[in-house]
Image: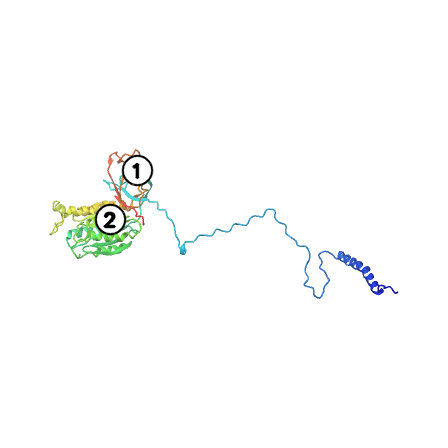
């Protein structure tokens, strides 16, 4: 009986492979240990990908105290339709122009302090916050009555206007306006004295005999209100109004409502009034209005705006008249105060300016010989408060 034996060639191959495999593995490990670190493998195969660095990843050392990144800017809110709005806080301040003139010499009184002025607004004392003296060029309108009624009136007007013209300075701006039935602008504001002289020389033959002073003054106030700064109106005429569309109440309201305008009025016909014995100087069928009433209207316009009224009888008085006007215009105190009544209600506030001493008593002035000196305070008698929409 025959027994089976393993196949000798197959068994021999199996034993040979087991003996060779550990040696090959040891050679590969030895080669790996001998290759320097960080060098790429040089073994390539046909299907190998691109060669890459298989070394370790190097991380930067983190700073011990990194500063936090700045916060992003807050977004700016936008108004609807990109509109621009502003907020204004209107602190009410009132400026009062006041002149202090000696009655005897008509000289300006300098050197007064804020404590010397007492301002009453509707009877309530106010605190003057600042005071300064201004001496500046003037911007004035000569408003002249030029009507065919009396040669004496025209002569008085021409004498007065030429006297004022001669008192002008090179940096003064003057406009010349005449009125009869209508208002006529002879020249606009200019500092060219030749232009002003030509305007005055053209007043030769008057037109209408009407004297509409209310309408003319209203139009003039309306025009000068569009000009910045302090303005003056030199009103020369009889004060008689014959055909105006406006009434006295309306022109008075216009004078009150127009800020930064001072009126100086010079009445004509004073010599005729003296000849008539005070019964009115409107002769020639014009005695229907009393002369004193007409002149009182001119005086009212002046006093309401802090100006002065004159009624010179003789031509020789005119230089002194305009010397007083120049002292009042070119030298004045500008007083600033914050009213206790800060309501913007558009009401008319009456203002009165007084001079007081350190104890609050009326201020007394004396000359070099110790004699008391009388003085006048020329200031506007009120102003209109702002409206809420202003």
Q: Residue furthest front?
A: 1
User: Foreground residue, 207 or 192?
Assistant: 207
User: Foreground residue, 7 or 246?
Assistant: 7
**Horizontal and vertical percent for residue 291?**
15, 47
Real-space Cα separation, disc 2 to disc 1, in angstroms = 29 Å
Q: Residue furthest left?
A: 285
Residue at 24 percent of width and 35 percent of height: 372
Q: Quadrant of residue 1?
A: bottom right
Q: Is residue 320 visible?
A: no
Question: Which residue is disc 1 drawn over?
Answer: 116
Q: Quadrant of residue 356?
A: top left
Vertical position of residue 182 compared to residue 134: above or below: below
Q: Is residue 247 visible?
A: yes
What SS does tag 2 mark? Answer: helix
**Horizontal and vertical percent for residue 18?**
81, 60
Question: Which residue is disc 2 drawn over?
Answer: 255
Contact between labelled residues 1 and 2, with CB atoms less than 8 Å apart: no
Answer with left or right where residue 52 lies relative to residue 315. right
Q: Earlier in the sequence, mark 2 or mark 1?
A: 1
Nearest to viewer (mark 2 / mark 1) = 2
**Horizontal and vertical percent for residue 390?**
32, 49
**Horizontal and vertical percent for residue 299?**
20, 45
What SS does tag 1 mark? Answer: helix
Q: How many marks?
A: 2
User: Foreground residue, 66 or 92?
Assistant: 66
């Amino acid at each position: 009986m025959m027994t089976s034996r393993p196949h000798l060639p197959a068994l021999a191959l199996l034993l040979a492979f087991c003996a060779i495999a550990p040696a090959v593995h040891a050679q590969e490990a030895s080669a790996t240990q001998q290759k320097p670190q960080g060098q790429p493998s040089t073994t390539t195969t046909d299907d190998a990908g691109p060669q890459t660095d298989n070394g370790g990843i190097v991380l930067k050392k983190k700073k011990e105290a990194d500063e936090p990144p700045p916060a992003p800017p807050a977004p700016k809110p936008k108004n609807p339709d990109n509109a621009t709005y502003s907020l204004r806080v209107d602190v009410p301040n009132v400026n009062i122009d006041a002149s202090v003139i000696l009655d005897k010499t008509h000289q300006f009184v300098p050197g007064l302090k804020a404590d010397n002025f007492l301002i009453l607004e509707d009877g309530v004392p106010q605190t003057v916050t600042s005071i300064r003296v201004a001496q500046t060029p003037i911007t004035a309108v000569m408003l002249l009555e030029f009507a065919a009624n009396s040669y004496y009136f025209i002569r008085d007007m021409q004498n007065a206007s030429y006297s004022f013209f001669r008192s002008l300075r090179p940096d003064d701006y003057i406009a010349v306006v005449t009125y009869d039935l209508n208002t006529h602008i002879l020249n606009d504001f200019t500092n060219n004295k030749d232009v002003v002289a030509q305007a005055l020389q053209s007043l030769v033959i008057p037109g209408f005999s009407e004297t509409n002073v209310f309408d003319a003054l209203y139009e003039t106030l309306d025009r000068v209100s569009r000009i910045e700064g302090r303005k003056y109106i030199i009103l020369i005429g009889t004060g008689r109004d014959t055909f105006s569309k406006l009434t006295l109440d309306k022109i008075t309201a216009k004078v009150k409502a127009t800020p930064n305008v001072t009126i100086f009025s010079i009445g004509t016909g004073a010599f005729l009034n003296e000849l008539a014995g005070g019964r009115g100087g409107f002769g020639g069928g014009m005695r229907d209005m009393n002369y004193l009433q007409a002149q009182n209207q001119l005086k009212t316009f002046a006093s309401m705006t802090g100006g002065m009224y004159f009624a010179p009888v003789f031509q020789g008085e005119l230089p002194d008249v305009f010397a007083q006007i120049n002292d009042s215009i070119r030298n004045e105190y500008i007083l600033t105060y914050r009213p206790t009544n800060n309501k913007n209600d558009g009401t008319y506030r009456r203002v009165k300016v007084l001079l007081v001493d350190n104890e609050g008593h009326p201020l007394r002035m004396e000359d070099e010989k110790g004699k008391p000196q009388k003085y006048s305070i020329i200031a506007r008698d009120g102003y209109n408060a702002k409206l809420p929409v202003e």
